[in-house]
Amino acid sequence: MVRPLIRELVLSPGTSAEAQEKAQIQQLQAGSEEAFQWLVSKYAPPVYRLAWRLLNNPADASDVAQEVFLKVFRGVGQFHGDSSLKTWIYHIAVNTVWNQNRWWRRHRGAECALETTDPETGAEELPIAEDGPDPLQSVLSHETQELVQTALGRLEESHRLVLVLREIEGFRYDEIAEVLKVSTGTVKSRLARARQSLRRELETMMEPAAREVPAWRPAEAE
């Protein structure tokens, strides 16, 4: 029997997204190496990005991503489709991140990472093309991202998580509810409080530092 390739399944016309996902899950549960490679290539980058934003440590985020897909590989046989494959993976990722975070607090105290590599590229700097954005705007954009990331790190875990899922990863309310195993009403109220907390943190961080103005003295005549 010829097993259909994942890429043929995804590109086949007239196949609904739900049917495609069901077929992909069946191939995963059957132990298809190609299906698992497809799964990793599709979800590993966003899972790593999520872990990086929540842990603010590239090494820990990499460890989390590897652990997540080990759990996915071991647990996909018991996946019954009660949620989408995407939200099931993110649910595992969130739990793995919090376990890592608890370990981090116990064993590292207040240590924090100093790396500033981009979570998607792993590069410290990206060259600006000749027809790219204005360099000043690129610097300002980078500084804004750093500011937001720092402010996110100061929030409590539940607020940081819901903001990352909604505002950065673009999850719908119902998807976030599936990931966190809460109601959509809880997601909306938590998100509202999280936005307020983030706004307060950003306002505090952007307040100009008080500087003492030197006293004016008239110039002495020569």
Image (cartoon, rainbow, N blue to C red):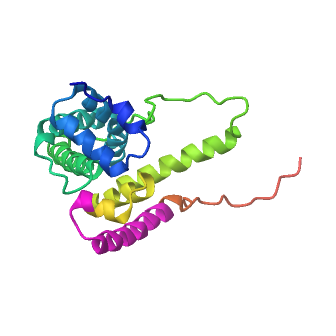
Q: Is residue 205 left or right of residue 42?
A: right
| Place of residue 90 in the rendered image (x, y in percent of width and height, measured from the top left) | 27, 49
Q: Which residues are magenta?
A: 178-204
Residue in front for this viewpoint, 147 or 79:
79
Rendering quarter of residue 104: top left
Q: Is residue 161 above or below residue 38?
A: below
Rendered image quadrant of residue 6:
top left
Instruction: Write down the quadrant of residue 51 in the picture.
Output: top left
Q: Does residue 128 appear in the picture of this structure?
A: yes
**Above-or-below relation of 8 to 22:** above
Observer-nearest residue: 179 or 38? 38
Q: Name the quarter where the N terminus is drawn.
A: top left
Residue 213, image x, y percentages: 64, 60
Residue situated furthest front in the rendering: 1
Confirm whether the magenta stretch covers residue 61.
no
Name the residue: 65% across, 30% down. Answer: 128
Q: Is residue 127 above or below residue 50?
A: above
Number of numbered discs present? Answer: 0
Residue 117: horizontal and vertical position, in percent? 44, 33
What residue sits 45% from the left and 31% below the top?
Answer: 121
The residue at the point 23 percent across, 41 percent down is: 25
